Image (tube, helix red, strand yellow):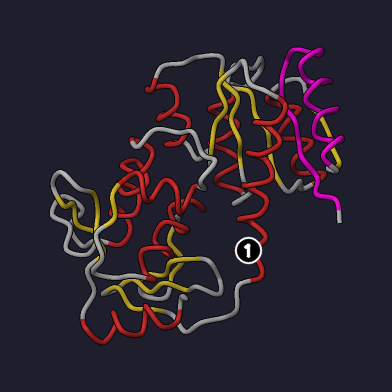
Amino acid sequence: MARTVLVVDDEQSLREALAWSLEQDGHRVITAADGREALEKFRAEQPDLVLLDLMLPELSGMEVCRILRHESDVPILMLTARGSEIDKVVGLEVGADDYVTKPFSQRELQARVRALLRRREVAETSPGDRPIDLGRVKVDLAGHRLLRDGRPLPVKPKAFELLQFLLKSPGQVFTRQQLLERVWGYDYAGETRTVDVHVHWLRAVIEEDPAQPALLETVRGVGYVLRLPEADRQRAGSTTT
């Protein structure tokens, strides 16, 4: 079944080229030329992925991304003409799952879109598992959510995928590059700073004191490790593989 992609860009020629490229790859495409139209189209069509330009009239791409993330966990692939790390990090901080810096090839765009949709499909079809306790926070693997005292916590989709991956191997140290390859995908061309941003988000919701993490620890000069009590460590490894 074809997946629907919302393409948001104020340049008509680029918007049409992006739509053509995605349609050639088998997707259904709808388009919007500014931030307000993007929100209207999203709410009316409920697309499976949003391809969002950073620089937009009416509402900026950053603001549209922030609003969408409050309303949905839809994968968001941000387009930016800027090359600085800070712009990429800010895009990730407001909820984008990935980004592509202009100019980019048709093949790269199609690969990024396919990777995000593939991860979405895996999350939607994963078998149900009992929640895993992280102190007061429970990881609901089947529902793809975190709960504190029974109440859902806001968590970005990619941050949850990172936690889900770490739960498969509690106690094992992973480098940032390993996490990029295994969570974001081997074809991901992003920077390792991306991992740090998502670890920061996770700590904000799972740690009692994010400034002194007891669960998701930094191993200096190497990367990160998820520490769990023995009983939870055994069950986490067995239920998430």
Q: Which of 110/37 is in front?
A: 110
Side of 37 where 105 appears, left or right: left
Q: Where does residue 102 sit, x and y in percent of width and height?
A: 60, 17
Name above or below for residue 131 compared with residue 61: below
Q: Where does residue 159 sit, x and y in percent of width and height?
A: 43, 52
Say which residue appears at 38% left-offset and 38% top-offset. Answer: 194
Side of 235 where 207 appears, left or right: left
Circle 1 SS class: helix
Q: Where does residue 71 sit, x and y in percent of width and height?
A: 61, 48
Side of 26 where 134 appears, left or right: left
| 5 drawn magenta | yes
Could you tell me the amino acid type at mark 1?
Val
Name above or below for residue 155 compared with residue 167: above
Name above or below for residue 153 compared with residue 131: above
Mark 1 lies on residue: 122
Say which residue appears at 65% left-offset and 66% top-offset. Answer: 124
Which quadrant holds residue 224? bottom left
Which quadrant holds residue 78? top right
Q: Where does residue 61 sit, x and y in percent of width and height?
A: 59, 25
Name above or below for residue 44 compared with residue 20: below
Q: Which of 166/64 is in front?
A: 166
| 222 drawn magenta | no
Side of 30 where 133 appears, left or right: left
Say which residue appears at 46% left-offset and 53% top-offset. Answer: 183
Q: Which residues are magenta?
A: 2-25
Say which residue appears at 46% left-offset and 75% top-offset. Answer: 240
Specify the quadrant that holds the N terminus. bottom right
